[in-house]
């Protein structure tokens, strides 16, 4: 069973390690050498579900022997004061046997019967020893499960723990659970239950909601649950149609009155009044600094209340020295369960204590929450404090501060403006559903053109990332016109985003119309960022027209001026510089600016913009053939796109992942990712991602010698009016395949665009590709000279993979020209590079050419049977792990992130059916 009763799954999601430990304990008890284990985890962590796993395993017998006698008891807070209530529940299934016990256990049974009848015991060792004797003489192995140990009465808890310590020498397994570590003796072996990871959380959600929910809602539920299985179940059960349609923000806490809420509320009710007041202060200001908290404690009952909260495990110190509640859900419960009077008093106290200038925003937040003054003035103070706060301020989140300010503002323009600003911040924080909900509240308010324009800019941006590109373009153009006379910078930014929408849609004609409109807006007094935006649109438009030399002037200005303040602090402006450098052929500078954009976005907490920032970084890395880095960043980009509801970006990241799979020769993965990218792109009108997915399949076709298929695919790419980056990547593949199929005319036509652009940029890598294409089209007598020219240009460039591709083609030409010795030099170099990249199909090409050139080479199929089940990159990782390398060492060797190694290892274990590194080593050997 899954965490939610009635929902079946193959296993308890994310608890393989814990389930294995429990089964192993039961198996040892079956063999006569039992033991005990204490599971530690907060409410809803899955402790009871794990006991169910153990009980089911224990109850399973064999033809030769019975299953275990399973005895279970669950602590109940209402019975904590009743001596032996826990033992009464535990022994109830065998109560009828106690009176009929044989002589060997009669005395033990009599003592237990008396204790259970009267609620009193003899004290000392006698009763716990009697319980142990009873279990040892049960006639078959016994599993004792005591759930919620913290609520068991003390005599029962002591007796069960006595048995637990001595079970190792008997066919008895004892499993205990507790939400509070201090309730069990510290000498018992324990197993803390960590929160579920993201993958397991998503699997639980899929079990709970088989029909699925939108990606951004799915990610929001996982974020709200914080790895708590019961929270996931209750959040899923609380969804309404409004949540599913995106018209209401996703739930942030499990429903009030649910099991998890009640469990936390019960825990809080047991705290002394002074401690509860201190806990409320922490709940009202999560991450509160130590100085403020100590001052608050001293103003009440001294530090004893703070110590009690820490001892109870309710308040914990964070790594940065602040204090928070142990569980974010506990924080919500602590705040919501307090009365309005207590909450207002807490906010007033905090506002009085936060007297530093750097605490201005938190002070304004608490005054607004306490309604400590006229609402309009409180709202104004909150907005001003937010404007003055550092961008990295963690509390309160900007969209919440602005939403609160809007709630305190009367009807009219100011309220609408604050809601629009809150929506923008919610979108930037990766919460699109909340942004849409905030925007919907503006519709009923009276607002002027500027506020409407700002709201439309956010709405169009949301549509650009999660809706249809054509609809986004319409909305953004309307926003630009509304803002033109009141906020020129935002109007021009709306035009840039409208241009991006038309670019993603592959609608070059509309992009050129947008660029023409932007050109009419130029003014001598334009600020720095507005001037850069207009130059960026002009340079892009000239590129789309094929006027590369004309584009160079505008693009160069963008590329060189983006690092001038204030644009150096804007991730989106840095992206313009990265794109400009790509179009100028400056791959290294593009990589620098794209990396800087990612860093700035992270520092600003702009989660929602990260997928887009990573797109540009990936393109820059692809330019230099850093495919492992591309794969790692595309995986991160895809995850972030799914979490923040950015489907258009998700489609592009899927396409990049398909491309890296094609390079690795992983046909199955490439086909799956490309198909999903094309499907997603078609649904959202992202022609660029569709072209990239098709390009990935074409690369795979070329690598697999399916040149006719490659030509057909690449013709499709050429017909879609795709941007320069895609066409530059496609042209060398198209020329190679067209030459192989005899379509020399099409190959020559395709080369014209690449050569014209490469010539304008003087980028050695792109010039080398053009020279390689000319070599393939040249007569045999001229081909060698062209290949030599291409290799010389490659030496000046940075892309080792394309250099190897050129050497492979040149080696083949040399071999066919009866120059095997010269051919082998290039083929060996190519093979070495392909193997370093894990490019299986290209390595096989190089080996085949070497064999044809008279050289004996190791066959590509020299893996073990198990190894052949893995992709090229998986095999590389598995081999290094089997040799003893850690995840971090593997990552360093292969130039990928440790997280990517971990992801691959999960897939490797699943494919090979192993559960540990030891098993992996044995299988691969």
Image: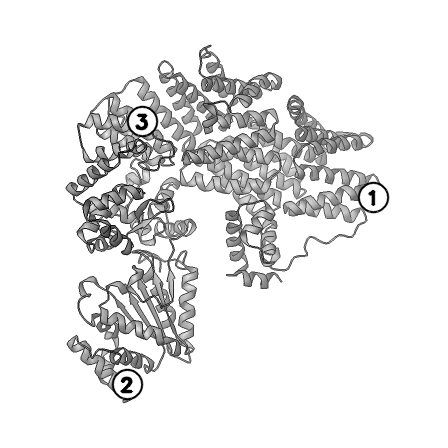
Instruction: Work out how far the residue at label 2 is from the one at label 1, CA to CA, in angstroms.
Output: 89 Å
Q: Position of residue 307 (x, y in %)?
A: 26, 53
Q: Which residue is mark 3?
A: 420
Q: Is residue 251 visible?
A: no
Q: Which-is-in-front pick, marks 2 and 1?
A: 2
Image point 30% across, 65% down: which residue? 184
- Could you say which quadrant of the image residue 708 lies in? top right
Specify the color scheme.
Answer: one colour
Above or below, 17 relative to 459: below
* Dot 3 crowding, Cα within 10 Å, few <14, some 14–19, many 20+: many
Pick the front one: 626 or 306: 306
Q: Which residue is mark 2?
A: 105
Return the disc, 2 or 3, that comes first in the chain's sequence.
Answer: 2
Q: Secondary structure at mark 3?
A: helix
Q: Which-is-in-front pick, marks 2 and 3?
A: 2
Above or below, 882 relative to 536: below
Instruction: Work out how far the residue at label 3 is from the one at label 1, CA to CA, in angstroms.
Output: 70 Å
> CB under 8 Å between callouts 3 and 1?
no
Image point 20% across, 39% down: which residue? 349
- Could you say which quadrant of the image residue 126 lies in? bottom left
Q: Which residue is mark 1?
A: 821
Return the disc, 2 or 1, that comes first in the chain's sequence.
Answer: 2
Image point 50% across, 19% down: which residue? 537
Query: For the C terminus, which image quadrant?
Result: bottom right
Q: Secondary structure at mark 1?
A: helix
* Dot 2 crowding, Cα within 10 Å, few <14, some 14–19, many 20+: some
């Amino acid at each position: 069973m899954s965490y939610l009763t009635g929902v079946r799954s193959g296993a308890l999601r994310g608890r393989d390690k814990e389930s294995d430990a429990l089964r192993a304990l039961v198996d040892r008890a079956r063999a006569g050498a039992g033991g005990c284990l204490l599971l530690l985890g907060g409410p809803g962590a899955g402790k009871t579900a794990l006991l169910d796993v153990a009980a089911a395993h224990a109850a399973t017998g064999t033809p030769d022997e019975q299953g275990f006698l399973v005895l279970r008891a669950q602590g109940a807070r209402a019975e904590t004061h009743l001596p032996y209530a826990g033992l009464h529940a535990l022994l109830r299934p065998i109560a009828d046997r106690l009176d009929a016990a044989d002589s060997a256990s009669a005395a033990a049974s009599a003592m237990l019967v008396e204790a259970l009848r009267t609620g009193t015991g003899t004290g000392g060792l006698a009763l716990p020893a009697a319980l142990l004797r009873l279990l040892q003489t049960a006639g078959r192995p016994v599993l004792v499960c005591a759930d919620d140990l913290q609520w068991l009465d003390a005599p029962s808890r002591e007796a069960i723990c006595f048995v637990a310590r001595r079970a190792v020498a008997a066919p008895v397994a004892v499993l205990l659970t507790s939400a509070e570590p201090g309730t069990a003796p510290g000498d018992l072996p324990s197993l803390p239950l960590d929160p579920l990871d993201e993958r397991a959380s998503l699997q639980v959600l899929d079990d709970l909601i088989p029909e699925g929910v939108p990606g951004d809602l799915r990610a929001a539920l996982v974020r709200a649950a914080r790895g708590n299985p019961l929270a996931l179940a209750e959040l899923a059960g609380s969804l309404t149609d409004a949540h599913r349609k995106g018209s209401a923000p996703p739930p942030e806490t499990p429903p009030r009155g649910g099991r998890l809420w009640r469990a936390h509320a019960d825990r809080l009710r047991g705290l002394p009044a002074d401690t509860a007041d201190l806990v409320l202060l922490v709940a009202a200001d999560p991450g509160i600094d130590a100085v403020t908290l100590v001052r608050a404690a001293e103003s009440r009952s001294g530090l004893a209340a703070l110590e009690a909260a820490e001892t109870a495990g309710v308040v914990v110190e964070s790594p940065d020295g602040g204090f928070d509640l142990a569980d974010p859900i506990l924080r919500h419960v602590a705040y919501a369960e307090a009365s309005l009077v207590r909450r207002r008093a807490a906010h007033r106290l905090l506002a009085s204590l936060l007297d530093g200038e750097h605490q201005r925003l938190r002070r304004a937040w608490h005054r607004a929450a306490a309604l400590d003054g006229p609402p309009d003035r409180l709202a104004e103070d909150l907005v001003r404090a937010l404007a003055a706060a550092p961008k990295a301020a963690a509390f309160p989140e900007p969209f919440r501060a602005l939403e609160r300010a809007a709630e305190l503002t009367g009807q009219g323009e100011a309220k609408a403006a604050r809601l629009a600003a809150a929506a923008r911040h919610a979108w930037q924080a990766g919460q699109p559903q909340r942004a849409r909900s905030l925007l919907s509240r503006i519709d009923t308010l009276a607002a002027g053109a500027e506020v409407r324009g700002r709201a439309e800019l956010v709405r169009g941006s949301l549509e650009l990332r999660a809706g249809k590109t054509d609809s986004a373009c319409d909305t953004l153009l309307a926003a630009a016109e509304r803002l033109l006379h009141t906020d020129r910078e935002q109007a021009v930014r709306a035009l840039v985003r409208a241009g991006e929408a038309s670019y993603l849609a592959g609608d070059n004609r509309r992009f050129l119309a947008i660029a023409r409109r932007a050109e009419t807006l130029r003014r001598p007094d334009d600020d720095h960022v507005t001037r850069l935006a207009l130059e960026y649109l002009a340079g892009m438009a000239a590129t789309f027209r094929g006027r590369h030399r004309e584009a160079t002037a505008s693009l160069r200005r963008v590329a060189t001026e983006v690092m001038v303040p204030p644009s150096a602090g804007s991730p989106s402006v840095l992206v313009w510089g990265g794109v400009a450098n790509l179009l100028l052929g400056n791959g290294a500078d593009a990589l620098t600016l794209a990396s800087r954009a990612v860093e700035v976005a992270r520092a600003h907490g702009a989660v929602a913009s990260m997928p887009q920032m990573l797109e540009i970084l990936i393109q820059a890395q692809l330019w230099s053939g850093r495919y492992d880095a591309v794969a790692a960043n595309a995986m991160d980009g895809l995850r972030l796109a799914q979490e923040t509801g950015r489907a258009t970006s998700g489609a592009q990241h899927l396409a990049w992942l398909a491309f890296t799979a094609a390079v690795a020769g992983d046909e199955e993965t490439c086909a799956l990712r490309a198909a999903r990218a094309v499907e997603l792109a078609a649904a959202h009108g992202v022609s660029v991602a569709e072209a990239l997915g098709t390009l990935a399949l074409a690369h795979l076709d070329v690598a697999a010698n399916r040149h006719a298929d490659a030509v057909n695919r690449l013709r499709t790419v050429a017909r879609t009016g795709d941007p320069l980056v895609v066409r530059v990547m496609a042209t060398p593949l198209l020329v190679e395949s067209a030459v192989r199929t005899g379509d020399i005319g099409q190959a020559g036509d395709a080369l014209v665009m690449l050569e014209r652009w490469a010539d304008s940029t003087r980028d050695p890598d792109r010039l080398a590709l053009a020279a390689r294409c000319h070599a393939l089209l040249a007569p045999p007598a001229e081909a060698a000279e062209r290949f030599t020219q291409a290799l010389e240009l490659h030496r000046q460039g940075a892309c080792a993979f394309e250099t190897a591709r050129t050497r492979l083609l040149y080696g083949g030409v040399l071999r066919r020209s009866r120059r095997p010795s010269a051919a082998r030099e290039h083929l060996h170099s190519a093979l070495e590079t392909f193997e370093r990249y894990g490019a299986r199909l290209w390595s096989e090409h190089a080996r085949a050419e070497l064999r044809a050139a008279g050289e004996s080479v190791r066959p590509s199929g020299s893996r073990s049977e198990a190894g052949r089940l893995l992709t090229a990159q998986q095999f590389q990782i598995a081999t290094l792990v089997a040799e003893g390398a850690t995840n971090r060492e593997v990552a360093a060797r292969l130039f990928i992130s440790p997280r990517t190694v971990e992801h691959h290892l999960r897939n490797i274990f699943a494919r090979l059916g192993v559960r540990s590194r030891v098993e992996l080593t044995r299988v691969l050997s």
